[in-house]
Image (cartoon, grey):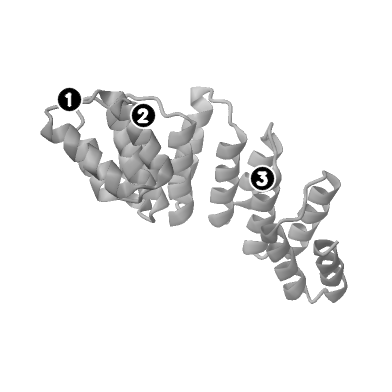
Amino acid sequence: MSFSRLLRLFGDSKCILKGRTLHAKMITSGFHPNVITNNHLLLMYVKFSRINDAQKLFDEMPERNVISWSALISGFSQIGMPEVALNYFRLMVCCVLEPNYYTYVGAVSACASRGDARSGKEIHGRMYRSGLELNSHVSNCLINMYGKCGLLSSAQFVFDASLERNSISWVSLLSSYCQCGEHVHGLKIFVLSRKAGVAISEFSCASVLGACAVLGNLKVGMQIHSLVFK
């Protein structure tokens, strides 16, 4: 079995000790991994939240591609280091590498964590100029980011322009309105989501019941509570 297949296997099984042992064996045996094998190593360390190991490997890689950069950006974003994630995103762009969906999800999520509307808008603009057709995952990240930055009109715009809406799209928009104190509008979004056939989730339920509590609307709150137990 190849090193790449073993690394993929260890990454999926969450077996960090075996993965690190294999990496050490590669080094001591004089094996020179190509970019594909290095990317599997990088993804393994990111999955295990071993971001220091991932960064060290990335810095030592003689060749990097969009997968390498995206893995590291996502890794820093996921462990709560959005500033570093955005720094690597900017470095990637400076290296004249075109980001992909995974890169943008990591970068936009980092903006959401920081409440960085300016960087978020810049990244969104870059997507638009590149002609990238947004999938639901990227659109949902944008809705969430704009909501956390208090830019509800932008969140609504992304939602309205989304070609693929799913339950996460609706919950993201609903949560955005409720987080910004627009509880009445949040309830309207909830009603529209139900008409669209979206099932109630624990996240949508929490947001809409919170809105009912703020508005003092016990009747609607009880109706929604009853829907959960149907």
Near mark 3 (Cα within 10 A), the count class, few <14, some 14-19 or many ≥20, is many
Q: Quick one: label 3 or label 2, which is nearer the N terminus?
A: 2
Q: Nearer the viewer, mark 2 or mark 1?
A: 2
Rendered view: 179 above or below 1 = below
- Residue wearing tag 2: 5
Residue 68, picture quadrant: top left
Quick one: label 1, few (<14), some, or many (20+) residues within 10 Å?
Answer: few
Q: CA distance from mark 2 to mark 1?
A: 16 Å
**Which sits in the foreground, 63 or 5?**
5
- Residue designated by label 3: 169
Which percent across, then down, holds residue 180?
Answer: 63, 62
Q: Secondary structure at mark 2?
A: helix
Nearer-the-camera pick, 228 or 32: 32
Q: Earlier in the sequence, mark 1 or mark 3?
A: 1
Query: Label 1 amino acid?
Result: His
Circle 1 or circle 3, nearest the eye:
1
The C terminus sits in image quarter: bottom right
Q: Is residue 41 left or right of residue 112?
A: left
Res. 146 in view: yes
| Residue type (three-letter) at the residue carrying disc 2 | Arg
Which of marks 1 and 2 precedes in the sequence?
2
**From this viewpoint, is residue 182 visible?**
no
Q: Quadrant of residue 216?
A: bottom right
Q: Are marks 1 and 3 in contact (CB under 8 Å)?
A: no
Amino acid type at image mark 3: Ser
Residue occupying image coordinates x 40% and y 25%? 98
Element on which disc 1 rests? loop
In this rendering, the count of numbered labels is: 3
Q: Give the residue pinned by disc 1.
A: 32
